[in-house]
Amino acid sequence: MVTKRVIGSIKSLRAFNQEVIPERLFELGLIFSSLLQSLTPGKRPSGFVIGPTNSANQASAWAKALNAGARSGNSISTRISGDGAHEWFEVDYHIKTSDRVGFEFRERLINELFLPRKAVLLESLRPYFAFRKRAEGFAAKFAIDDLLLLRRMGKAVGVVFHGSDIRDPLAHAMRNPNSPFSLDSAAPQAHADHLAEMVKRSQGNRDLLPKLRAAKIPTFVTTPDLFIEVPDAKWLPAVLDMGRFEAVATSSKLFTSEKLRVLYIPSSSWIKSANLITPILEKLRAEGVIEWANWVENGAVRHDEITELLANTDIVVDQFMGVFGVFALEAIASGRIVLTYLDEAHSHHPTPPHINVTPETLEREIRRVAIERESTFIRAQKMVLEDGEPRLNFIDVPLDEGLEAGTNFLCFYHDGRYSAGVMRENLGLIGRKHA
C-alpha cells in the first residue's frame, strides 16, 4: 500500500513538472509581454476581442459599433466552429476547432489577437485557449482560467450570455405557460434529447456564476428575461444594421395586398412553437385571410434574404418564449408589425412596440389586423409615476404612432451607440476613445 502511494506521488510530481510548471512559466511570459507592450509607445493595446460564438452576428455588430466611436478601430469579432461548418455571418477572425487543438496555434492566437487589444468580451463562457485543459477538453470552466489569465495580462474582461447558454429551460417551463420546453409525451425524442443537452449546458454555465462574481468579472445579457438567471448582469442590447432595415420601411409599405401578408420563419421550429403556430396560419391561409409561405417545411432562410422577405410582409409572428429576439427587432426596424409573447415582467424593462399574443389569442389578433389594417392598434410603453416612482406601462396606441415609437426605440437602444457605451463603461474603459 505504501509503495503504491509513493509511486502515485512520484507520478503526480512528474505530471506537475511536465504540465503545470511549463504552463505557469508560459503564462508568466505572457504577462510580462503584455506589460512590456502596454509601456511601449505606439504599441499600446486598444480595442476589444469579442467572441467566440458570434451568436446572431452580435460579436461582429458590437465590434463595428465600438470601432465607429474609436480612433483606432481595433475591435474584432471571432468565432470558433468545426471544420466545414456552415457560417451564416462574417467574422473578422474564424478559428477552426481542429486548429485549436494544437498548443502552438493557441499560443499564436493569444499573441496575434489578444496582446494587441485592451479588452475581451467572452460569449457564453466558451474558452479560447484552455491552456490547462489536459484530457478534459475545452470545458466552460476553463473559460474562467482564460479570463483570469487575460486579466493578469492587464486586459479588461467580461462575459455575455445570449439565451440558451444560461437560461434554465425547466424553470422557464414552470413560470411560462407557453414555454416550448414543456414537452409532453408526444414530443419527438430528438426534441427531448435537445432539451436535455440544453439543460446540461446551461446548468454548467450557471454553476460558474459564483466564480465569476467572486472574481468580480462583469456579466452581460442580451435580453431582459435573462435577469432571472443573472440578476446582477448588465443589459447589452443587440445591435442592428439600422440603415439596411430602415430602407425596407421606406420603400415597402404595409397592406399593399388584398390578403394580409404573414411571415413566420422559426430558426428552430420546436423552440419557436411551430407545432402551435403553423396550424393557425394554415387555417387562416385556407380561409383566404392571409398569404403565408411555410418556412418550417421550406428550410432555413439565409440572413441576406431577410430584407426581401420583410419587404413583402405586413406582420411577423415571432414566438412564445417571452423574449424579443434579433429577428423581431429587425422586423420592427423594417416597419413591420410584430406579434409575440412577453409577460408582464417586461413592464420593468424597455420593450419595443408589438402586439402581445398567446397560443389562445394569436388567431384572433391576426384576424383583427386583417380587418382593421391601418386603423389597428399595437402595444407600446409609456413612462408613468406610481407612488412617486417611475414605471413603464403598456398602453395601446394607433399603428402609425406605434411604428414611429418602434423606430425611435431602436435608434436609441439598438443602433450600436448605446451598446458600445455599456461595454466601455462596465469594463472600465469609459472615456478611453482608443478602446
Image: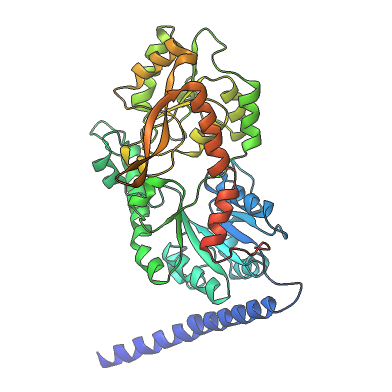
Tell me the residue at 65%/28% (across/down): 247
Residue 190 appears anywhere in the view? yes
Q: Nearer the viewer, residue 280 or 298?
A: 280
Quadrant for the C terminus in the image: bottom right
Q: Is residue 366 above or below residue 244?
A: above
Q: Give me the residue at 57% from left, 82% from top.
A: 28
Q: In this view of the protein, which residue sits in the foreground, 312 or 208? A: 312
Q: Can you name the residue that lies furthest to the right here?
A: 42
Residue 83 in sight from this viewpoint = no
Instruction: From the top left corner, tell me how far across and down residue 287 is, in percent.
Output: 40, 7
Q: Considering depth in this image, is 239 or 346 the residue closer to the camera?
A: 346
Spot occupied by residue 134 in the image (x, y as percentages of width and height): 46, 71
**Would you say 44 lies left or right of 363 here?**
right
Residue 45 higher or lower than 407, as above or below: below
Residue, x 43% and y 62% (percent of image)? Answer: 139
Whether residue 43 is situated above or below residue 91 in the rendered picture:
below
Give residue 270's position: percent from left, percent from top. Answer: 37, 33
- Judge from the rendering whether residue 109 lies leftward or rightward of residue 161; answer left or right: right
